[in-house]
Amino acid sequence: MTKIRMNTELRNKLFNKIKNVFENEDTQEREAFLMAREEVDSQYGIASTLAKEVVERSYPTDDVATLRTFKKKYGSPCDVVAKDKCFYFAHSEDLDDEGETKETKSHFDFGLFGNLNGSEYSSDDGRKFAVAYYREELKAKDCNPDIFAQQSENKDNPHKTKHVDECMKALGYSGSYGSGGDQIGMAKEFDNPYYLDVIGTSYCRSRAIACTKNEYEQFETWRIAKSNLVSKHQTWIDTIQKQCDQLKIGLKAYRYLSEGIELATELGIQVDEAELIRTNSTGLTIYNPTNLASMIKGMKNKNQSREAKILARKQYEESLN
C-alpha cells in the first residue's frame, strides 16, 4: 500500500469531519445550551402574555379603537396609535435610603435583536442572542453562528465582520434597529407576535408604563433567560474551540493521511480514507506514485509504429462490441 501524503485539502476535510462530531456530541455544555434555549421559549411565552396585560391596562383596547376611528375621521392630527415591541416598564414599590418612594424602570425589547442590558439601542448582545437562538438555521445556510463566541477575546477584524454580516443578512437584519418593523425573514417572523398597540407620539423612553414590582421582576426573569442563552452558548463553543485548537496542531504535524485516520479512530470517529481521497481534488493524483506516473505518461506524445496503431484501433472497435 502506498502512503498518501497529507496536504491542505486533506487536513481541512479531516478537521471538518472531526469538528462536526465535536459539535454534535452529547456533552454537558451542549445540553446546558439546549436547555437554556428551551427556557427562553418558555419565558418569552410568560413575559409576552404579561406584557399584553400590562400594556392594555395602560392603553385599553376600547381607547385604541376610538382613537383609530378619530384618525380615519380627522387624519394625521389624531395619528397617535402605533404598534411597538419594546416598552419601558416601571414600578414605584421600592424605597430609597431616606425611605422615600422611588421609581424603578427599564427598557424591555421583545425583538430578536433587543438589547439585554436595558438599553433601547441595539448592540452585540442582541446579535449574540439572535445567532445562538437560530444556530441550526444559520448553519443550514452555511453561516457561522458561533463567530461571536469564537472571537470573544478578539477585537473587530475582517474575518469576524464577514461572518457576522453573513449571519445578520440570513436572519433578516435590516442594518438599523428600532420599532418600525423594518426587519425581514426570520427576524420579522420572530418579532411579529410581540407587537402591541400603544398610545402616544413620543419615543418609548418617554412613556414609562406602570406595572407592579412582581410583574417587573417577571420581565427581568425573561431578560435574564436571554442573557443565559448567550452565556451557555459561549461556554459550549469554548470547549469545542479548545479541542479544535489541539486538533489543528496535530493535523499540521502529520505527514501522512494514515496518521490523521488513526487520530480519528482513537477519538472514536470512523473516517473512510477511500472517501476522503475519492473526493479530494489533487491528493490522489499528486501524492500517489502510481497515479502520478500514469498521469505523466499520459502527457507524453510518443511516436507509434503502424502496427501499434492498428492494434490500438482493433482493441477500440472490440471494446465497442
Image (tube, helix red, strand yellow):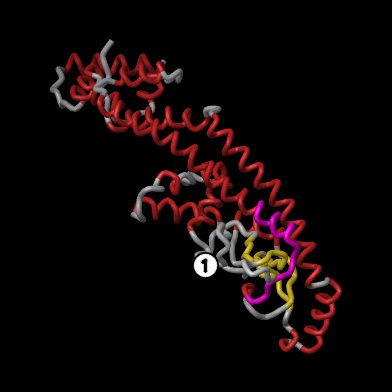
From the viewer's perspective, is 188 left or right of 245?
Answer: right
Nearer the observer, 235 or 246:
235
Q: In the image, is residue 124 above or below residue 300? A: below
Seen as rendered, the residue at the extreme top is: 1
Query: According to the image, label 1 marks what residue?
Result: 176
Name the element at disc 1. loop
Q: Quick check: is 215 in the magenta stretch?
A: yes
Q: What secondary structure is the stretch in magenta mostly built from?
A: helix
Q: What residue type is labelled 1?
A: Ser
Nearer the observer, 294 or 237:
237
Residue 238, image x and y in percent? Answer: 44, 38
- In terms of image quadrants, where is residue 312? top left
Residue at the image position 64 percent from the left and 73 percent from the top: 204
Per the rendered image, the range of residues in magenta is: 206-221
Quadrant of the drawing holding the C terminus: top left
Residue 253, image x and y in percent? Answer: 25, 26
Q: Quick check: is 166 in the magenta stretch?
A: no
Residue at the image position 66 percent from the left and 51 percent from the top: 221
Q: In the image, is residue 164 above or below residue 261? A: below
From the viewer's perspective, is 200 left or right of 248?
Answer: right
From the viewer's perspective, is 76 left or right of 18?
Answer: right
- In terms of image quadrants, where is residue 195? bottom right
